Amino acid sequence: MFYIMSSIKLPIRVLTHNIRYATSSPFKGEQPWAERKQLLLNEFEYEARHCAETFLCLQEVLHNQLGDILAGLNQNAELETPEWEYIGVGRDDGHEAGEYSPIIYRPAVWELLHWETIWLSKTPETPSKSWDAASIRIVTIGVFTHRASRNTVLAMNTHLDDQGSQSRFEAARIIIDKISEYSQNKFAELISGTFLAGDFNSEENQEAYQELTRSLLDTYKQVKSSRRYGNHITWTGFGYEDEPASRIDYVLVRPTGAQGQRLAVIGYAVLGNRFDDGVLSSDHRAVIVDLTL
């Protein structure tokens, strides 16, 4: 199949989901990872089935969870040619320790040109935390070229701190600076679409969201309310927390026309995280955004 770049629109689906790390001390109302993992795998497989260009951007993923997810997604693929691969590292040591914020993609569809993980701290090249952050925080970055059409996207996935307001603000500034860096480096002329997905731990009136949306668009607001699907809230908890449910998970994009950006938002959804069996797959709901390039 050949794409005519001037007239054919390339569909891209971005799914972002904080899957809740595999804790050995579950909250009240929380089922262990062994009971939740197939529910999440079913979600990923269903939502990516009819869009080969899907990116799965996950948060709170421990190394064993990443192994389970990749094994599940690749169970019908040949060992030599897995259907799905990932970029990302554990945040605690830059290897396998601590939570990942991986970007999972189909290598037969997307050619990975470059990737990196940076730490959202004063020393972004090494595992670290700064300011008032309670935990080490990262952003995973990938430059992907669509093999058929040769369109290139800059994909980013992050999970900001849940405790430190200043650290969230400073992290947002680091991410914006990184996007600016990619708009000037050797990939600048290739990139025609940029998105940032993740759990920002920030509501609309708070620091990280406000800083990020100074230059990026909230995809939720690019779709008319009458055309959005599903829920509004993205963080539900497991039913026994003191905090109110809130919208803190997002997909943001660079505006079209900015330095050759051509990503358009055509759909927005927040999925359910509990069905008839009563099991919460996570304390967050998945956000799905459909884009065209």
Image (tube, grey):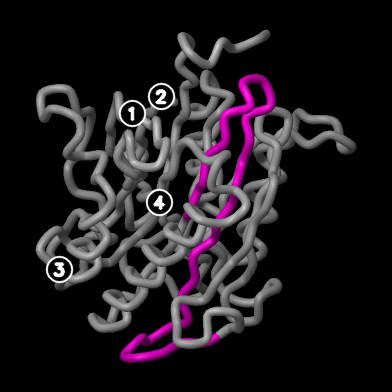
Q: Mark 1 points at which residue?
A: 264
Mark 1 and 2 residues: CB-CB less than 8 Å, in contact?
A: yes
Mark 2 and 4 residues: CB-CB less than 8 Å, in contact?
A: no
Nearer the camera: disc 2 or disc 3: 2
| Relative depth, front residue between 29 and 61 | 61
Graded by Cα atoms within 10 Å as few (under 14), some (14 to 19) or many (20 or more), the crowding at tag 3 reads few
Rendered location of residue 218, percent (x, y): 24, 45
**Residue 151: within the magenta?**
yes
Q: In the shown orientation, is residue 54 left or right of residue 113?
A: left
Q: In the shown orientation, is residue 213 left or right of residue 45?
A: left
Distance CA(mark 3)–CA(mark 1) = 26 Å
Label 2 or label 3, whichever comes before in sequence order: 3
Q: Mark 4 points at which residue?
A: 196
Graded by Cα atoms within 10 Å as few (under 14), some (14 to 19) or many (20 or more), the crowding at tag 2 reads some
Q: Name the residue under label 2.
A: 292
Magenta residue span: 128-156
**Residue 292: within the magenta?**
no
Name, please, the residue furthest toward the bottom: 131
Label 1 or label 2, whichever comes before in sequence order: 1
Amino acid residing under circle 2: Thr
Distance CA(mark 3)–CA(mark 4) = 17 Å
- Screen quadrant of the C terminus: top left
Name the mark on residue 206.
3
Amino acid residing under circle 4: Leu
Q: In this view, does 19 lie above or below 217?
A: below
